Image (cartoon, coloured by chain):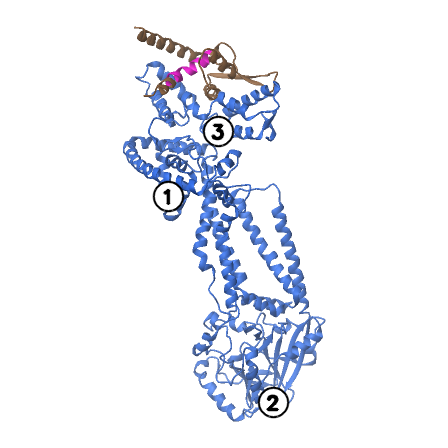
Amino acid sequence: MNIENTQSQMRKGILEFCILSVIRRGEAYPSDIVEEMKAANLNILEGTLYPLLTRLKNADMLTYRWVESNSGPPRKYFCLTPKGETFYGELEATWNELANAVHALTKK
Amino acid sequence: MKKIININFHSRVIPIEETAYEILQQYIESLRRYFAREEGRDEIISDIENRFSELFADKLKKGAACITDDDVNSIIASMGRPEDFEADDETSPTAGASQQGATGSSSATGAGASGAGTSGAGATGASQQGGWQYNTAEPRRLYRAENDKILGGVCGGLANYLRLDPAVVRIIFVLISFGWGLGFLLYFVLWMVLPTKSLPAVVRKRLYRNPDDRVIGGVASGMAAYFHIEVWIPRLIFALPIILSVISSLIGSAFWAHAHFHYSSPEFITGGFGGTLFIAYIVLWMVLPEAVTASDKLEMRGEKVDLESIKNTVKSDLEGFNKRAKDMGKEMGDRFKEMGPQIKQNIQTFSSETGAYARKGGSGFGHAVGVLFKAFFLFIAGMIAFGVTIALVSLIFAGDGILDLKSYILSGFWQNFLAWAAFLLFFLSPVLALLTWLIRRITGTRSRTHYLGYTFATLWVIGLFCFIALAGMVMNSFRSRQHTEEEITMSQPSQNKLMVRSAPRSGRVYDTDWWFNDDDWDWKHRAPFYIFNDDSILLTTVKVDVLKSDDAQYHIKVYRFSRSDNSRTASELAQQISYPVQQSDSVLSLPAGFPISKNQKFRNQQVLVAISVPVGKRIIIDNSVRSFRWFNLSGNHRHIHWSDGDEDTWEDQTDLDNTYPWNSNVEYTMTATGLVRSSRKDREDSEKPEQPERPEQKEKAEQPEKKEKPEQNQNDKQNSDHNGYRYQGPEKPAHKNNSDSPAIKSTTMLTVPYRGELGLLTALVHTL
């Protein structure tokens, strides 16, 4: 068993949940999402974020619109779709269950 | 000091160092490969590029003059490299099971949510796979290289496993594929069995093709860069077979030119060796990647290699290789055992992979097929090129027969010069251009300029002008036609019957028979010339016409014709024709031909023997004279040749219009209305029983009366060595007797290649 391997697997599962929660608070620009997650001490590579966003968007969880920026070309701002909202709801419920279970088990 | 280039990057103009640009390009390319099978690949890449462009713009806004390597590297670090993604990215594109993108990931998270680990088989399966792929502590495994592939990445993966240059593995694969066809099978099995992975490069230095300095494919130049040697060394090695064959041809022709020996083509000496090198070049061309980017070029040169380091590398490589090969064998065994179920999955992956290829409109699979086709066509083109090269070499160097024939037609420096120029430019340059075009087309090489095309076109046009000029000059030297006329004094045959036959040629004559080996072929009888040696050819443009005599006597007139650029030289040339007609009572012997020398040139010299037969007397024309009708190009041959203004109107002075057609071996009687057959019995039918007796008959008839022109006969014999032929006594007819002339064949020493062309040429000149 390899510690890094396990760690990365633990992180993987929650990544989408975290991203969706950031977007849910309001339209978000990918680099903002990275910054916000960094601030919460959850490091993610931008290169990983873009494919994830695209996949979620292709699964109709997310949508985006172009926002003019004052420096250069327009940026993509992402927001949740209704489907994404329900998806997020399910994930949140699962997370709470999981967190409680883990908490209950580890703090015993 | 670094070069800065401006790029238009997502609608921003970015000044960037060239090296930084290379890094960026490579990074984007690695992403492209990583996301190769991702549905939204283009969008992802575009997003990332957009971000890059934004960050670049920020940098520039803050006052940076340009984007440097460091800038790009730091952005790449924050973006992450494909290798880093796999740690984070649960739906790694390499996990064949989770092709469905977001659907896959959602089901995976869903499963993970519903019960940690128990029912989450899909998710754990996928992530485990992603895990051990990334895990370096795991024993090394054989993969197909995702990022370094020509077809399926099998060779790249093998090379990675064995820590060899992928080119080496590919060469081996190609060789065993060409050798036994086994390679293809093995390759496809491995393609199906092995999983893919983006593998890091294990070799610091790789063999590339160098596009900057190339003659054909840049192979030699790439090798030179790899081994740090002068570029001419590998080039020379590759070109050696051609050079060798040229040299040996030269030596060969130098040795054999005078003997006129039909030497075996020199390419046999070097053919095997040259062929191998040629194939090696083609294989390398196919297999080696082109060094496109700056880092490719760095990799191409690598660190300096001297003999010591090669020795060390080879030594350690071989040691390691043994072990690794053993490991690999073991692992393959294990793999196949444990892989029963997994193969199934892999085959599914394979089919989905190929399916994905097909779906992408052939970008992937199409490329694979393209490479196969390229290889195939390269092979074919290579063979063609090889063949053509060899043919040209042998044509130029073995075909000095052409030179001999040429010198009968061409005169003076300019005509020879033009002939060579026309040959090289008009005929060879299109061939070369076609080959070049083919090869460039196949390899997809396109130059922005059309210099090559212009060059070839110019050369060809020059060649065309040379050809036209040459044709004009040659035609000019055939412009005027003159003739001489000579009445042969003859004694009237005693039996009121004249037998016309061909004077047999001597054994020393260089017959064309060896070329065809049987005399049944009619071409021989239509050939405008029989024989030629160093300085003369024997023209057989002799015709026999039969006319009605005005009086009661046989008359024989010999007309000699020649063409030239003016009438004076034409009649001189006509005069020079030596055509001794001999008569001995009833037998008229006509020489089979007349020699012309190189100095005289071939100017369509012709001889017409007009035999006037008085009414009531008979004539029989022997089968050996059968071919004495000049050319049978057209039935109406009398009217083809002379009609131009500059011609002498000799037929007006004679009554040659009233000639009668004749068949050989038929006895005719002249009547007031023309020639009629003497008997109903066609002697042609009974040719065979008659043939053996005829020579005896004639010899008997001739012996006592052989009085006319014996001196001339002697002279001919004396001259024969000079002229290369001689007349001997009429011991046998020239035709149909080749079965008993092995001596002729064995003494045949000269080649008459390309006579067909000359025949055509002369025929052409005739009709002009």
The kind of secondary structure element at disc 1 is: helix
Q: What amino acid is found at the position of numbered circle 2 in the picture?
A: Met
Marks 2 and 3 in Cβ contact (< 8 Å): no
Q: Is residue B299 above or below residue B750?
A: above
Kind of residue at disc 3: Arg
* Residue at which label 3 appears: B32
**Residue at the (47%, 70%) spot, across then down:** B516
Q: Are marks 1 and 3 in contact (CB under 8 Å)?
A: no
Q: Of marks 1 and 3, which one's residue comes earlier in the chain?
A: 3
**Can you tell which chain is drawn brown?**
A
Report the disc number at residue B490.
2
Marks 2 and 3, the one that precedes in the sequence: 3
B570 vs A63: above or below: below
In the picture, the quarter occupied by the N terminus of chain B is top right
Q: Which residue is mark 1?
A: B183
Q: Chain of mark 2?
A: B
Magenta residues, start to end: A9-21
Nearer the observer, B216 or A63: B216
Which chain: blue? B
